[in-house]
Image: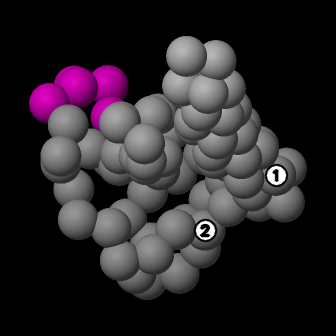
Amino acid sequence: MSDDPKLGATGEFPQGKLNADDEGGIICAVSIEGDKVRIDFGPKAIAWVSIDPDGAIAFASAIVDKAMAVKLRGAKIMREAFKQ
């Protein structure tokens, strides 16, 4: 879990309240930790997330970008190891 104060619940409903369970917007981070892609939602436990189509594409793209960076880093390590 992150201690980043910018992550977590915003208390706002930027696209309106979806239903009675909707607790508002959340700011998350997609990063690399070791050889894993980490998605950090901050200190709040998250039961579900609703994202509009453009936001879902952006979120998916961020995850894929980080995953590719991990894969490419692994490939670079392998290439360097076989040069020796």
Asked whether 46 falls inside the magenta stretch, the response is no
Pick out the residue farthest to the bottom.
Answer: 20
State whether residue 60 is above or below residue 34.
Answer: below
Identify the amino acid type marked 2: Ser
Residue at image location 45% in from the left, 75% down from the top:
48
The residue closer to the viewer here, 30 or 50, is 30
Vertical side of 64 occupied by 24: above or below: below
Residue 26: % across, % down: 43, 47
| Residue drawn at point x = 46 percent, y = 33 percent | 31
Magenta segment, prevailing SS (helix, strand or loop): loop
**Camera-nearest label, 2 or 1:** 1
Q: Quadrant of the C terminus?
A: top right
Query: What residue range appears in magenta?
Result: 3-8
- Position of residue 76 relative to residue 15, above or below, is above
Which residue reaches farthest front?
84
Q: Amino acid at mark 1?
A: Ile
Q: Which mark is residue 57?
A: 1
> Which comes sooner in the sequence, label 2 or label 1?
2
Q: Quadrant of residue 68?
A: top right
Q: Is residue 50 above or below residue 70?
A: below
Residue displayed at 20% across by 37% down: 2
| Image spot of residue 59 (x, y percent) | 68, 48
Residue in view at x 43 percent, y 83 percent: 20
User: Could you say whether the residue bearing mark 2 is in a helix, strand or loop?
Assistant: loop
Q: Which residue is mark 2?
A: 50
Q: Cα distance, mark 2 to mark 1?
A: 12 Å
